[in-house]
Amino acid sequence: MNVHDVFREYLDALVAGDRAACQRIVEGLLDAGTDLKSIYVDLFQGSMYRIGELWERNVISVAVEHMATSITESLLPLVYGRLFGRPHVERSALIACVPSEFHQIGVHIIADFFELHGWHGHCLGANTPVDGLVAAVGDMGPDVVGLSASLAYNLPVLSDMLEAVATHHPGTAILLGGRALTFGQGEFSPAALEQRFPQATYVASIEALEAYIESPRWRNGT
Ligand code: B12
């Protein structure tokens, strides 16, 4: 059994608000040993992107979109049993949404991907204040900080948060991700942000994130 086989059934259950059916499907995939990456990307992310399209086209209401989001958030912990038992290295990542950004499923998934690759992945969730993040980086000393923005109009806020973290923690690597970056132009384009803040790297896909985590810089401890 793979995600493709159950996707339609899962999406229908999500739209119907049938939590029990959604949970059964996820548990079935886990029992079948389905690749966790596929559960995160093809099932959780794929179904939420579909929900976004249905919402945009007025096929489903905003209430149904909220319900689907809430169900998805409640299902993420089902994966934890297979996530936290893995061997870990002493590396950590701290992932947060920028201020005014409430799209937080992505940052939870990114923190989980660090766990999947043997790092400690900490997630601060939605709407993280700049000062709070700067302080948390000082307290927790992560190897990598990840900033997320989904809304195009939050790109200036992302840039401000990036500047604050880069100024206070010049030695910390920073990753930039989220849907907003695909719209970034001029001073807010990924290339312009990377040029202005050399410690920042834009990560455009899960594959790019995996390559980053497995890169010699982190593998060899240099
Ligand atoms: C669920 C949802 C909401 C929920 C979010 C609740 C929650 N707890 O997260 C709520 C109801 C709050 C919401 C509100 C709004 N939303 Co909304 N929402 C969505 C929806 C349907 C799904 C988002 C999601 O969970 N995606 C699944 C995750 C897994 O994907 P992801 O976020 O892209 O993350 C992945 C990658 O981007 C990447 N990534 C993300 N962050 C990072 C960070 C790092 C460091 C790295 C490396 C990678 C990375 O990795 C992740 C995993 O692969 C999207 C549709 C869509 N296409 O995404 C609209 C969408 C994002 N929302 C949209 C809009 C317009 C809004 C509102 C403005 C609506 C309104 N009028 O009020 C508000 C704004 C609220 C705010 N200030 O944030 C638009 C954005 C359009 C734009 N041009 O910016 C979208 C695209 C819907 C649409 N088609 O119009 N929304």
Image: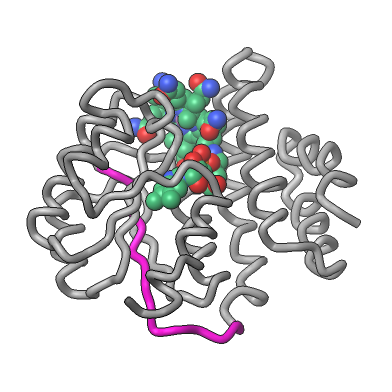
- Give me the residue at 80% from left, 35% from top: 12
Q: Nearer the viewer, residue 51 or 90?
A: 90
Residue 127: x percent and y percent?
29, 45
- Give me the residue at 22% from left, 64% from top: 172
Quadrant including the N terminus = bottom right
170 vs 215, left or right, is left
Residue 181: image quadrant is top left
- Give me the residue at 87% from left, 67% from top: 32
- Give me the residue at 67% from left, 30% from top: 50
Residue 68: x percent and y percent?
63, 39
116 vs 193, left or right, is right
Q: Please, which colouring scheme is shown?
A: one colour
Q: Nearer the viewer, residue 210 or 30?
A: 210
* Magenta stretch contains residue 19: no
Residue 189: x percent and y percent?
30, 29
Quadrant including the C terminus = bottom left
Q: Nearer the viewer, residue 167 or 138?
A: 167
Residue 145 sits above or below residue 176 on the image: below
* Magenta stretch contains residue 96: yes
Residue 9 sits above or below residue 39 on the image: above
Q: Is residue 104 visible?
A: no
187 vs 44, left or right, is left
Residue 7: image quadrant is top right
Residue 178: x percent and y percent?
43, 40
Q: Is residue 51 visible?
A: yes
Farthest residue to the top: give it: 57
Farthest residue to the left: give it: 167
- The residue segment tinted magenta is 85-98
User: How many badges with numbers are in the image?
Assistant: 0
